[in-house]
Amino acid sequence: MRTPRKLLILTPYLWLGLFFLVPFLIVIKIALSDSVTASPPYAPAFSLDDGLAGLRASFAALDFENFLWLAEDGIYLKAYLNSVKVAAIATLLTLLIGYPVAYAMAKAPRDWRKTLLLLVILPFWTSFLIRIYAWIGILKNEGFLNLALMKLGIIDQPLAIMHTELAVYIGIVYSYLPFMILPLYASLERIDGKLLEAAEDLGCSAFAAFRQITLPLSLPGVVAGCFLVFIPAIGEFVIPDLLGGSGTLMIGKTLWLEFFSNRDWGVAAAVAIVLLTILIVPIVLFQRHQQKHQEELG
Amino acid sequence: MIRRFNMFNLTSLTFGLAFLYLPLLLVVIYSFNDSRLVTVWGGFSTKWYGIVLNNDAYLEAAWITLRIAFVSATLATVLGTLSAVAMVRAGSFPGRTLFSGMIFAPLVMPEVVTGLSLLLLFVAIGLDRGFWTITIAHATFAMCYASVVISSRLASFDRSLEDAALDLGCTPFSAFRQVTLPVIAPAVISAWLLSFTLSLDDLVIATFTSGPGSTTLPMKLYSSVRLGVSPEINALSTMLIGIVTAGVITASLVNRRQERRRQQDHRAAAAAA
């Protein structure tokens, strides 16, 4: 290999190795270590100080204390299951809201599409925190939503939405809507209009044409959009923390609290590992789907 | 070809865009509210902007955030370009699968896990936490986004141009600099802008990897937001929304002009042929 080519590959390789792979191995090590009251608050499960024999001895002494703790205390299992549930329902809601918008964008006059696309992407560039903050002002008891509904005489008691799971759904749908709309739009826009014309000429109703042509052809976009919302939503921290209440257990928030409030690094690391194991299935499925889709297009 | 909107599509678009923009619009409008009560309109005023701009804690946090974003975006763009070239152009090399895995994984890694693992690394190697640890952390996850953006441009670019430059006696480096780089420049610029925004926006990873004296603006904002809605946060948010909006619109206008020029070039070339 020539030296410049070697350098070209080695620089990003070493960077990712040092700042992605090594930290990941450290997380595994600390998840296997025992928690102690010290700084840093864990007793290393193994070190290279005693050579290979010492390493073998420490492997024999591994007791998976942190993982057993996660399994025994029901609160963690609840948090995992609840994260999956919340992410799944929020993904479905995002799809229901995003599909008509993406459909309308794809059907819009050609000169409008670029502007509409920009309008959908623009809020995504705005700070995540500000977008969540905006909903606190709307959803809280004396917020804009309750104010408006009471003025209109629809309710006379303010609705308690803030600090509930409903507020978390609203937050996720709002924050991740562009991730859903963009792949949907990409697959809807590609559909050949002649197919729909042909269907109509052959006596198909508009709805039947949608169900039999548009919907199946847009499925790759639906699948991609759902993964793009579902995967990050599972590990979400900011939304359940700011909009959810103490009853809304989600795993990202649990990890954060374990680390910052309880200062239990071992349990936090174990939570991280279990979280990644849960994510592997959707991530691998997503990557396969993308590859297959790419091949079909290519 | 449909030239007009129909009723159903127009309704979906109106509701969709209202849903996306109404919350931000309320923040912007109420940042000019004279009253301290955040949902009661007390007349027009810009006093909250004065208060924010005179708040040293906010200004200091903003300055740190901008510096981190600038340095980390630059690092991420260089590393992202290198890894994109390695993935698309270098052919096969030992450990290629691991490399592509390491570029893909941070994109789907929950922020809490990325933050935790980097913090544990910094503690293990005894690096003092502060400006540089946040910068390294941001550069690491942003380089993966940068690499994806640049790879897609690089993959669609005709390789024979580079080969021609090499045949004509260019060194690989000058072929890259004189032929490849100008073609992928728009992607490199968007990668930098994306990395910059990701860094500006990040709360979770910064909280894990920051130390005393390196509080970023999102961290400051987060601790204020936890205390509730206030006109100061509205004013600060409005300023940030304004900056981002101006940036994105400028970038898209520049992009559109370039596109038009390229189409003109294509037409001219076709006419000449």
Image (spheres, grey):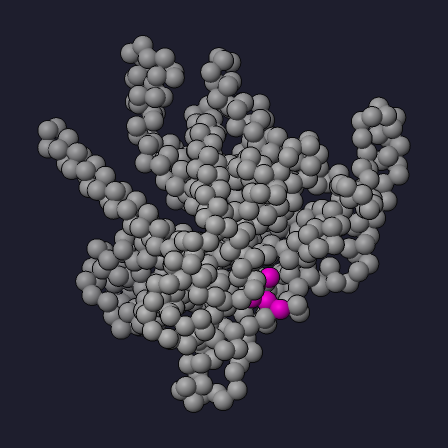
Residue shown at 59%/48% (left/top)? B207
Please, is residue B105 above or below residue B204 in the view?
above
Indicate the quadrant containing the C terminus of chain A: top left, top right, bottom left or bottom right: top left
Q: Is residue A285 visible?
A: no
Tell me what residue is drawn at x 74 percent, y 54 percent: A262
Q: Nearer the viewer, residue B121 or A181?
A: B121
Taking B43 as reference, is B109 above or below it? Answer: above
- Can you see residue B192? yes
Q: Quadrant of residue B236?
A: bottom left
- x%, y% of residue A251? 66, 57
The tally of labels here is 0
Range of residues picked out in magenta: A241-245
Front in this rendered view, residue B75 or A119: B75
Q: Residue furthest left?
A: B271
Q: Quadrant of residue A198?
A: bottom left
Q: Is residue A141 left or right of residue B35?
A: right
Query: Which one is in front, A88 or A162?
Result: A162
The one nearer the camera, B60 or A101, is B60
- x, y (%) of residue B269? 15, 30
